[in-house]
Amino acid sequence: MSVPQLFFFDVDGTLLDNRHHRISPSTLRCLRQLQRQGQRIVISSGRDIDTIATMPELVAIDWDGYICRNGSVVADRDHHELFRAFFKPSALCQLEALSHRLNRPILYMGYQEWSNLPPNDDFRKACTFFHRLPDQIPVRPTTDSDQVTMALAFGDAGDDYQEYAAIDSLTVLPTRFHYADLVIRGIDKSTGMRRLCDHLNIPMSATMAFGDGINDLQMIREAGIGVAMGQGCQAVKEVADFITDSVDQNGIEKALQHFGLLRP
């Protein structure tokens, strides 16, 4: 086994607990120790850099890179973009037609964020999970010339979002929290991993990744060592090299200790 040089961390449910969105003292110590040891740490999230920059829990850490929008945006430690991909205009047209037919809003994410329809109950519940105020998100029409890197659809917890899965060139990643990530088909967090590895001249075999959700599956599968959080979804656990304890039980620290990666 190669000693990992580059560590990738999902945010919600991995670095941050899902209830209070806080990073534990244990995890913070581990991140700083890895960097003292000369290893590099990277955020890998559905969030964007601007949002991460508003989160005191994460800003306090000197990250070595960012994979955002589930792999559609990659940036270096100085926030310089290395890669950004956009939805096809045809996908935007199909998504708009479906959204209006179902009367369910879509939260679009590009260089800005906006909703195409006023918030419904599921939209508001998802915003509560993210500690956001739905009425502060702009509502405006969406056109096929808009530059979108990711979007969120909203529904009941446990919804399979099958209507959205039929849209050309998009992949649907349902969550347990009243929303699904809509991402560009063929792009995921592992796409971002490879681009950042190429940029830093580090082989994929020398990486370690931590995650809990379906949007982490490819990242966990393709990392040199893939670690699933204890409370994570079954699909991620099935492809992981190791299943650690939950985010609330210092899962990151326990996995690093298991592999002997924290030096005395």
Image (tube, rainbow, N blue to C red):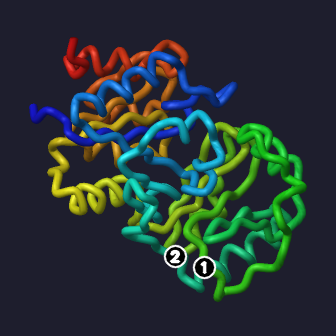
- Image position of 17 (left or right of 30): right
Where the C terminus falls, by quadrant?
top left
How many marks can you see?
Answer: 2
Q: Position of residue 28 (x, y in %)?
A: 46, 24
Q: Amino acid at mark 2?
A: Phe
Label 2 secondary element: loop
* Dot label at residue 226: none
Q: Position of residue 225 (x, y in %)?
A: 23, 34
Among the 4 quarters of the image, the one containing residue 30: top left
| Residue occupying image coordinates x 64% and y 79% | 92
Which labelled disc corresponds to residue 86? 2
Q: Is residue 204 left or right of residue 59?
A: left
Q: Nearer the viewer, residue 61 or 227?
A: 61
Quadrant for residue 261, please give it.
top left
Earlier residue among tags 1 and 2: 2
Which image quarter holds the N terminus? top left
Q: How busy is the neighbourhood of tag 1: few (under 14 within 10 Å), some, or many (20 plus)?
A: some
Residue drawn at x 49%, y 29% as measured from the top left:
232
Asked if the residue at tag 2 contacts the one at tag 1, i.e. Cβ–Cβ closer than 8 Å, the answer is: yes
Q: Secondary structure at mark 1?
A: loop
The 10 Å Cα crowd at callout 2, few under 14, some 14 to 19, many 20 or more, is: some
In the displayed structure, would residue 148 be above or below residue 127?
below
With respect to residue 124, does 256 lie above or below?
above
- Residue 147 numbered mark, or none: 1
Return the x and y of residue 228 as percentages of the image width and height: 39, 29
